[in-house]
Amino acid sequence: MNSNKLSAAIALAICAQSAVAQDSDHDHESLETVVVTASPLGASALEMTQSSSVLTAEELDRALKGTIGDTVEGLPGVQNASFGPGVGRPVIRGLDGARIDILENNVSSNDVSNVSADHAVSIEPFLAEQIEVLRGPATLLYGSDTIGGVVNVRTHRIPPRVADGLDGEIVLSGDTVADERFAGVELDFGSGNWAFHVDAFRRDSDDYEIPGPAELHDEDEHEEEEHEEEEFTGLLENSAVDTRGGAVGASYIGDGWTMGFAWSRFETLYGVPGHAHEEGHEHEGEEHEEEEHEEEEEELVSIDLENDRVDFDLQVENPFGGFERLRFLVSDSDYAHVELEGAEIGTQFDTQTTEARAEFVHNPVGGWRGVIGLQAADREFSAIGEEAFVPPSETDSLALFLLEEREFGDWRVEVGARLEDRDVTTADGQSAGHSPFSVSAGAVWHFDPSSHLAFNLSRAERAPAEEELFANGPHIATQTFEIGDATLDEEASTSLEISLRRHAGAFTGALTFFRNDFSDFIYLMDVGSEEDGFPVRQWTQQDAEFYGFEGELSYDIGDTELGHWVVRGFFDTVDAELDDGSNLPRLAPARIGAGLNWDAGNWSASLDVIRYDDQDEVASFEMPTDGYTLVNADLAYTLETAGGASWEFFARGRNLGDEEARNHTSFLKDRVLRPGRNLVLGFRTFF
């Protein structure tokens, strides 16, 4: 972390400590009742020893975008590893990919978005009724793939209660930057003990508008001359997206128990901007009949993805002596996508995954209340085609975990452990087995009625992913020739987090410091040679450290003659380097933002300004990116009808300054700009 970033972070931290820490009285009451369902003990966001954020209600509606990464990137410590508008995975405190797991109702999305940066997450954000982000290792509950954090998308596709009549939501919207058309509907109804759910959605957009040339040029390569030669059309070529899907679900609500299932389908066809395959074709000219030459022709790359998923959920209160609750979850996914080069199929990915977890919440024993759990998964993965850089494999895992909590006066203490066994076997006979073990201890100290300190210390291990172990070939998405290492050891993280939270009064907020020391951190090392025209990078291990600050604050101005006003602010910064002093690539830049919320009667509005810093602390093979400022605004009018229905008409402005912005956490940052000025118009109705 350079000195000016650190000074800015400390200055804002001091302001946050002296003035605030997390929500107004009204917000405090709501946060106390917002249960983080990713925790089987039902802790609220404020009472977690680990930092967490929850998007729900109006805040979630304003944040919703086309991908999960886009939707949560406004939260402190969270950015988006985009790969065009069709792909967005969260980056949490500088970590992404195989270190962040995305869940739907506490079970992994079970797609291949963690294998390559150009693979989409097969979850539609519109369906979320709550999105939970756990920052830092969540390995105790969800496995070694969560050593960096978890994003849990909670839907009610398996309805938890019987609707009183017909409940539902309908949303229609469109935008100007890509001519996006979106329609979504959710319906819940029931009879007696039976509850039913149906949903459907469609998102269709064209290539989006950009405020400048997409290509980023090195200053040493005659930048001005290159820009003059580049044809600027005002559109990002091959950035169109067409996504659709739906689900049906049913539950039986018994006396002290609930059992339900859901079937869902997710389909998306999206372009991969900034990527094209070159094919040589022979031509004969009339003037040179005996002469042949090859002309390079570019084929645009797109991905056609589909995922069928079946979920089962059983919950029983007081199932047997000594236990207050049992939850049993099973999910079975059949995932496939093809990478198209023009109209031709290049590479096909197929994954069949079955995952099950059981959680037994026991009655207090000696003052300790906790959960004992089992989790098992079987995943068959295959990639077929010229650019299948990872061989077909089967992964089996089994884990046992324990999490316990107890109150000691003003203190709440939490401890836990997880032991996991994972075996990976490839079709060509290679194999690797790992047994990651993780432990954690945390505490929350209520040193006064409106403030508390949270501490968390953990030692977590991650088993290497398939691509890290067995990759051997050109990886077009990252423009590299990847070579895996089947002898890689478990990656270990020692993580410390300290968070000060103030949750009452006009000034509220939180300030968090974190440090994450990795032993045997797994990363791609540039070996300095080329293969098939790509730089060769080898998966290898070295110690690394990550550390940073996060802060958020708000001041409730209260009611005035012009309405109710709330001022908000946040910042985040993370620094990371390997043991040899070199930087890690695509590290999230520091950010600082401010916002204003207003409501009066049926009207509500918000204005946000977010400044992304320059990122010049780059790895040896990447280019720096300039900072930029995004200005966003929202305006909504809500009408309540006599029949109980609610109608909301909304307008949203994004990047109102039409800034040329590059997402440094993206592999495409040198070839893709973020969308230009955008106006979204739409309405939603609840009934």
Image (tube, rainbow, N blue to C red):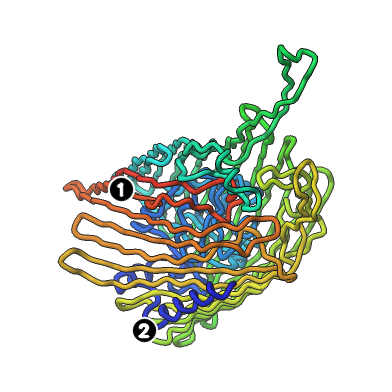
N-term mark: 1 or 2 = 2
Residue 678 at x, y percent in the picture: 38, 46
User: Looking at the picture, which amino acid does disc 2 mark?
Assistant: Pro
Per the model, the C-alpha gap separating discs 1 and 2 is 40 Å
Circle 1: residue type:
Ala
The residue sitting at 53% across, 74% down in the picture is 4
Residue position marked by numbered label 1 in the rendering: 651
The image position of residue 660, as x and y in percent, is: 48, 51
Q: Is residue 280 left or right of residue 513?
A: right
Report if residue 459 is visible in the image: no
421 displayed left or right of 245: right
Viewer-side label of 1, 2? 1
Residue at x-position 34% and y-position 49%: 652
Q: Is residue 625 visible?
A: yes
Q: Residues within 10 Å of mark 1 (few under 14, many from 20)?
A: some
The x and y percentages for residue 127 are 43, 48
- Crowd around label 2: few <14 · some 14–19 · many ≥20 (10 Å): few
Location of residue 599 in the rendering, given as x and y in whole percent from the top left corner = 24, 60
Which secondary structure lies at badge 2? loop
Q: Quadrant of residue 288?
A: top right
Instruction: Say above or below: 446 vs 619.
Output: below
Q: Residue at x 71, y 40 (%)?
A: 383
Looking at this view, is 405 or 78 the one in front?
A: 78
Observer-nearest residue: 321 or 223? 223
Task: State which quarter of the image contains the N terminus.
Answer: bottom right
- Residue indicated by mark 2: 449
